[in-house]
Image (spheres, helix red, strand yellow):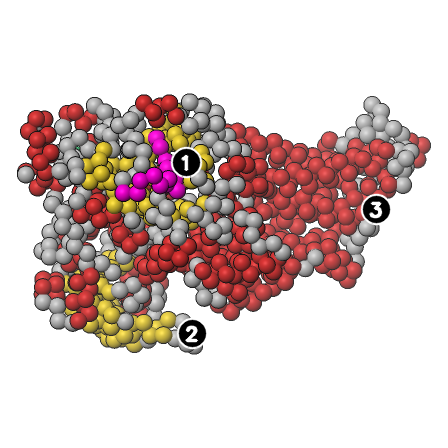
Amino acid sequence: MLEIVEVSACHGGPDAVTVVKDVTMSVAAGEIVGLVGESGCGKTTLARVVTGLHRPDAGVVRVGEVDVHAIRGRRALRAHRRQVQMVFQDPSLTLSARQTVRQAIEEPLRIHRLGDARVRSARVGELLDLVGLKPEVGDRRPRQLSGGQQQRVAIARALALEPQLLICDEPVTALDVSVQAKVLNLLCDLRERLDLGCLFITHDLAVVSQLADRIAVMQDGRIVEQGRTEDLTTRPRHAYTRSLLAAIPTLEIPAVEDAVRS
Amino acid sequence: MTVEARSPGRRAWIGTVLLALPLILFAVVGVLAPVLSPADPTANDLTAGLLPPSSEHPLGTDQLGRDQLSRILHGARISLSVTAAVLAVALTAGAVIGAAAGYLGGRVDRAVSRVIDVVVSLPGMLVTLAVIGVQGPGVENLILALSLWSWAPYARIARARVADLRKSPHLDALRLLGAGRARILGRHLLPPALAPCLVYASTDVGTIVLGVATLSFLGLGVAPPNAEWGQMLVEGRAFMDSAWWLAYPPGVAITAVVFASNLLGERLAAGEERPSVLRLVRPTRTGSAWPVRRKAAPSAPRAAERTTSSPPETVPGCPGETPVLRVRDLTVTYPRDGERRRVVAEMSYEVRRGEVLALVGETGSGKTTAALAPFGLLDPYAVVTGSAALANGAGTCEMVGLTPAERRRINGHRVGVVFQDSGAVLNPLRTIGAHVDEAVRNAGRGGRRPATRRVTEELLRLAGLPDPTTVAREFPHQLSGGMRQRAQIAMALACEPELLIADEPTSALDVTVQAQLLDLLARLREELAMSMVVVSHDLGVVTRLADSVAVVYSGRIVESGPLAAVLTRPDHPYTRGLLDAVPRPGTPPGTRFRTMPGQGGAGPDDTTGCGFAPRCPLAVASCVDAAPPLEALAGAAAHRSACLRHPGEPTVAVGKGDTSC
Ligand SMILES: Nc1ncnc2c1ncn2[C@@H]1O[C@H](COP(=O)(O)OP(=O)(O)OP(=O)(O)O)[C@@H](O)[C@H]1O
Ligand code: SF4
Ligand SMILES: [Mg+2]
């Protein structure tokens, strides 16, 4: 589904700094791949390269056999847009304060001129349902929603075009802990129901070790280790991975149900 | 219970309309002048010169026998058309130039910004005089001259808005959805940029009307036979003693329009959604626009009755020490659906000297409200009752029920506040230095300008901004989110506060920057020996900063105590659920994340008894009878939990479980 081959990318003009160095990785259909690394190690730049928002200096990004950065022409670009979508860290910054939820989710359908008003409205209803929001939420504006609800709206909007690949950049960092779990479960469900490939970018190894099929660990713009989740978390080879694993705080709390049983 | 401010929105709206009335009148009269005028404003009738007001000529006639009323009305028409033309040109040009510069960024932006800065700083009248000096007088040249002087502020406003939005992921998201340039600019960038421009335009009407009148007065604007207010003033001046009706009406008309326009602009700007920090750093201005009506008196007798919910008077471990802030039975209500609903219900907490207290909870739980209410930083229609005693030397000072004037002596003097959204707190048209200067002056520090600026730079350095001199000269949009947040921290530190309230200080930031800011706050707290209340939904933030934690759910504290105790031996089922939802390594991939059933966000008035009961796996029938009191756990006096069953105390829990199940 997604293939990243030897991609390097840098930021800024004359005093450019290379922030993504020679990255090679892939995401298959229906697979969740976690990309973990400390803040500022280049994860977001890689996400922007993958989605076509940032031009790489070297390397190729292919989505379903198409080279993302060699797409020419409006139609091809539109077709590509329908394949890959992205979910950002802070939903309150990515949703427009002036649009209602319904308008926000409908916007990509309008842009791509899909269906008439009635079809679109029905589709918005479906999408709200898919992400677990009640229909009446549709008439509210982002300010009137909780962070978790906003992120669900952002996910619904990203899914409106039925993409095959979803890039999630720290999608739960801005959310309440109890809501994080729900959004993560939502992603699991969507992967199964829609056979969605997902590149999940986070600084939190604990999250991806439970969510992802495979994990890639990034340090200073380089992938230092990647592999199946069980292997990587139980037998980390790189020192950096080991330090990330060691840094996860462990909270020894008996679950609520255990307390009841006792 | 106080029931004032029943419909604050409506009242504010009526005020706005009243202020707008002279302008509306001005516009209507200007448009309808030919219909309304009893006579031709330029028709001379030398036999009827200088007649005093009469039924035939309600405002008399001038020296040439022209009807004064008709001339005033036509004067409005001329002023209106010139103003409309200038605004149309200046606003369009300004918004387009500013938006383009903000959108394109880079070199174009830098060049345009420079030009804007220069134009804004030029004295407007001089520019106008220069243009007319070159082009000669006349209506077209008047419009040209005034537009040349007026466009720059619009450009600056539009540029700041667009530049802000351009950097936000909002546009990335739109691009990914396939939106083209035209759609992004037209639908998503210009409308939000235009709104503040229009607000500014309401002030500008006055300036332009005055400008037209002044130039005509000087003989450089509208030429004589035409009726124009400034022109009429000149002509009337000669007859001040004999015919007062010539000079006064145009003078009154000009004054009314100018005043109305200024006040309206001020009012609209204050009504814009700015968080309440403006009430803190700019008390006088917003104070007058939004009178804070609140009379709630501390409910001392009630506090005495409810002994169960108020923890013991002294804190175990440090006997006799008065806390910096002691909040008791704090209740906050907002109007909703025609009634008042509580969002914080009889909450009690305290912050000891040098301690960092974290209020944690989900969105809508009321944590922000609970932290800001004691300082009067909520929307004006919030009603706050209960008590919040701020330590004051040996005694304490009651914060609830203070008048805005009394409050000002405390906010920004002894208490500093940092809000989540720096973008909304900082005025895009003022430099960072100007913001901090104002906070410094407000705190009574500084003095003359250079002295104030020195304090400002020192504060900016303290807040971890490496080059304070440069940063002070920059505008908010030129800084990254993290730097803006640091600037806000510098503002809050201006008064050397004993207590810092930080509402989600890092939540709007990228994770990298979050970490740096948390380090900064931890360091400041050490260096300045401040007490802090940190509001956050993020357990990570809490563990890095806090000494004690209060877990807020549905407007009440459900569990509180020292950080380690609450995190490692949580008692309340909600706290347990919260900690349980934190992913743990070692869980096989693909397992579902543990969630809490149900949805948060219900207020204390939406449930009876324990607010968590609808979601609680341990709930029993008696849970909905009354809200459980926050009581100390067996063997840990500082650790309290508001649950009937106390699952954290194994022995007790089993006992209770046996009887109730
Ligand atoms: N200005 C207001 N007018 C009416 N209701 C309000 C207002 N501000 C807050 N509320 C309501 O008060 C409740 C508590 O809000 P508060 O902002 O204190 O929550 P919070 O815990 O800080 O949430 P978040 O994490 O989203 O900031 C919410 O239900 C909210 O809808
Ligand atoms: S009081 Fe009852 S409903 Fe509330 S948390 Fe305790 S057990 Fe659950
Ligand atoms: Mg809040």
Residue B230, located in which quarter of the rendered image?
top right
Q: Which mark is residue A13?
A: 2
Q: Are marks 2 and 1 in contact (CB under 8 Å)?
A: no
* Cα–Cα span, label 2 and label 3: 59 Å
Q: Are marks 2 and 3 in contact (CB under 8 Å)?
A: no
Q: Are marks 1 and 3 in contact (CB under 8 Å)?
A: no
Q: Which percent across, then down, holds residue A29?
A: 16, 60
Q: Which percent across, then down, holds residue A112?
A: 33, 53
User: Which-is-in-front pick, marks 2 and 3?
Assistant: 2
Residue lying at 67% horizontally and 39% vertically, measured from the top left: B259
| Quadrant that contains the C terminus of chain B | top left
* Cα–Cα span, label 1 and label 3: 68 Å
- Of residues B185 and B217, the one drawn nearer to the viewer in this rendering: B217
User: Which-is-in-front pick, marks 1 and 3?
Assistant: 1
**Left or right of B4, for residue B327:** left
Q: Which percent across, then down, holds residue B70?
A: 79, 34
Residue B398, located in which quarter of the rendered image?
top left
Tally the numbered discs: 3
SS type, badge 2:
loop
| Quadrant that contains the N terminus of chain B | top left
Q: Which percent across, then down, holds residue B399?
A: 45, 35
Q: Which mark is residue A46?
A: none
In magenta, the rendered stretch is B317-329
Chain letter behind tag 2: A
Residue at image mark 1: B389
Asked whether mark 3 lies closer than 8 Å to ligand 1, one says no
In the rendered structure, which amino acid carries the disc numbered 3?
Pro
Residue at image mark 3: B224
Marks 1 and 3, the one that precedes in the sequence: 3
Chain letter behind tag 3: B
Co-location on one chain, circles 2 and 3: no
